[in-house]
């Protein structure tokens, strides 16, 4: 009975899930569109190559593209897993802050680095698809990395088992590593991405505290 009640508490009410998706789906659409427009513009600007000696030593591992792609589905996983509505909406604010400030950086200081030469395997072809869809811009900071850690910090605030928190941390770290193994980002992109995501998440607490009166949520304490 205790197990069933605990499981029930972790299941979202259909109305609650529907309300979240009304925010998450449009936000995801706006993010994809804005990212694409900025990348298209930034790719036409003179760009700096900040490739380090570490990047030249890191091997190309196309198999990591499967981990890399997880970032595109994690927002929806977090929508299903996180219990506190406020954490979900705060995460949206954090991603918005990280993205908007990063867009300015992409235009003011464009950074680009060489892409990997791919082979014929399925993983290689998926890397090639990513290269074709993603302009060689929008690199520093890495929003792939920033968003992965924002989602981790969002889920980490949940009262869950230790193994669940460890799994989420491992996943965020794996996504971070995947960006350099598939040669979509370089070390400076990754380091700034972690800082960018952390700063945006901290700032989102204050921003959301001012916005929360306009977003109906369950009656739970606002996450710190």
Image (cartoon, rainbow, N blue to C red):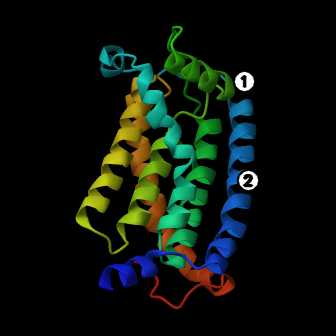
Q: Which residue is mark 2?
A: 30
Q: Residue 68 appears at what percent x and percent y?
A: 48, 35
Q: Are marks 1 and 2 in contact (CB under 8 Å)?
A: no
Quadrant in the picture for the N terminus: bottom left
| Residue 115 appears in the picture as rendered | no
In what element is the residue under mark 1? loop
Q: Residue 113's x, y, as percent? A: 51, 20
Image quadrant of residue 152? Answer: bottom left
Q: Residue at x 58, y 59 (%)?
A: 97
Observer-nearest residue: 36 or 85? 85
Number of labels in the image equals 2
Label 1 vs 2, first from the N-terminus: 2
Q: Residue furthest bottom?
A: 219
Any mark on residue 61, and which?
none
Residue 51 to residue 206: above or below: above
Q: Which residue does the numbered mark 1 point to in the structure image? A: 44
Q: Is residue 1 above or below residue 30?
A: below
The single residue placed furthest to the left in the displayed view is 162
Tell whether 108 sits left or right of 172: right
Residue 53: percent from the left, percent from the top?
31, 17
Name the residue nearer the viewer: 143 or 71: 71
Residue 193 figure quarter: top left
> Disc 1 versus disc 2: distance between alpha carbons?
22 Å
Q: Residue at x 63, y 45 (%)?
A: 104
Pointer 2 local density, CA inside 10 Å: few below 14, some 14–19, many at least 20: few
Q: Is residue 182 left or right of residue 125?
A: left
Which element carries disc 2, helix, strand or loop?
A: helix
Observer-nearest residue: 201 or 182?
182
């Amino acid at each position: 009975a205790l197990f069933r009640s605990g499981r029930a508490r972790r299941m979202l009410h259909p109305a609650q899930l529907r309300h979240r998706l009304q925010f998450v789906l449009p936000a995801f659409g706006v993010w994809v569109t804005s990212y694409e427009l900025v990348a298209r513009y930034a790719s036409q600007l003179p760009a700096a190559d900040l490739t380090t000696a570490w990047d030249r030593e890191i091997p190309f591992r196309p198999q990591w593209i499967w981990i890399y792609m997880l970032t595109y589905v994690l927002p929806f996983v977090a929508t299903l897993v996180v219990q506190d509505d406020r954490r979900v909406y705060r995460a949206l604010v954090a991603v918005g802050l990280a993205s908007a400030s990063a867009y300015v950086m992409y235009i003011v200081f464009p950074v680009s680095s060489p892409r990997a030469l791919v082979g014929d395997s399925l993983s290689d072809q998926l890397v090639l698809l990513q290269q074709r869809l993603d302009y060689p811009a929008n690199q520093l900071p890495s929003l792939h990395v920033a968003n992965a850690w924002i989602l981790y910090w969002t889920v980490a605030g949940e009262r869950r088992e230790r193994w669940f928190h460890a799994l989420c941390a491992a996943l965020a770290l794996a996504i971070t590593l995947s960006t350099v193994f598939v040669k979509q980002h370089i070390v400076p992109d990754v380091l700034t991405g972690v800082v960018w995501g952390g700063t945006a998440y901290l700032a989102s607490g204050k921003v959301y505290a001012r916005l929360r009166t306009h977003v109906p949520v369950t009656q739970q304490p606002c996450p710190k």
